[in-house]
Image: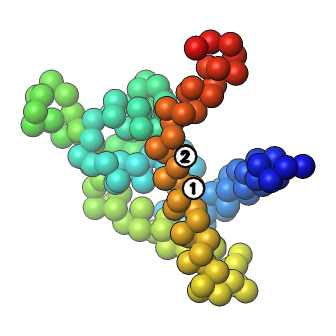
Amino acid sequence: MSDIELLAEQFAVLVRGLRELHGAIVVRCEPPVEAAAAVLLGRVEQLAPVRLTDVACSMGLDASTVSRQVSALVSRGWVVRDPDPQDLRAHVLSLTEDGRTTVASLRATRAEVLTRLLPDWTAEQLRSLTTALARLNHDLTTGSDRLELVGTSRHGKA
């Protein structure tokens, strides 16, 4: 196999492992958080104050799907909807104090689980991996236009 094929294979293994890791984190978190809610809480924290449609767009999801999930977060007391000061017909989402506490708990649980999973990794190895992942994440998130071009040309559309 070529280097790029080996990388693609490792990506597949990584995706499966990340799903399992995420599942382990959300069940250990206090209070318990559903996997989809954990992702949405993190995105609202990152973007707040933010319109629901912008959250949905940033996650590549339909607004109606995100709306149902946001309603569940509002009912849990983790997210609040406030009038959008720039368009009073719309609302913006922000975390409540309980929501920020829950996100902090998720982060702490994530660090605890990773510490248990990677006990033999040195600080230098962790920094090196973090640097490489940051570069990869940057290239993947800023390369969406390239991905669209690759996808359309593969199917004969251009």
Residue 115 in which image quadrant: bottom right
Residue 70 in which image quadrant: top left
Q: Residue at x 62, y 12 (%)?
A: 157
Looking at the image, the residue that sits furthest to the top is: 157
Q: Residues within 10 Å of mark 2 (few under 14, many from 20)?
A: few
* Quadrant location of the C terminus in the rendered image: top right
Q: Which residue is mark 1?
A: 136
Residue 64: x %, y % from top left: 43, 24
Looking at the image, the residue that sits furthest to the right is: 1
Q: Which mark is residue 62?
A: none
Q: Up-down: is 147 above or below 42?
A: above
Q: Residue at x 56, y 70 (%)?
A: 130
Side of 39 relative to 25 (left or right): left
What is the secondary structure assignment of the residue under circle 1?
helix
Q: Judge whether residue 146 can be spotted in this image.
A: yes
Distance (Cα) linking label 1 and label 2: 6 Å
**Model colouring:** rainbow
Side of 16 relative to 73 (left or right): right
Count of number-bearing discs: 2
Q: Residues within 10 Å of mark 1 (few under 14, many from 20)?
A: few
Q: Nearer the viewer, residue 97 or 85?
A: 85
Q: Residue at x 23, y 46 (%)?
A: 49
Specify the amino acid type for callout 2: Leu
Q: Which residue is mark 2?
A: 140
Specify the amino acid type for callout 1: Leu
Q: Up-down: is 97 above or below 144?
A: below
Residue 94: x %, y % from top left: 27, 48
Residue 76: x %, y % from top left: 39, 49
Residue 40: x %, y % from top left: 45, 46
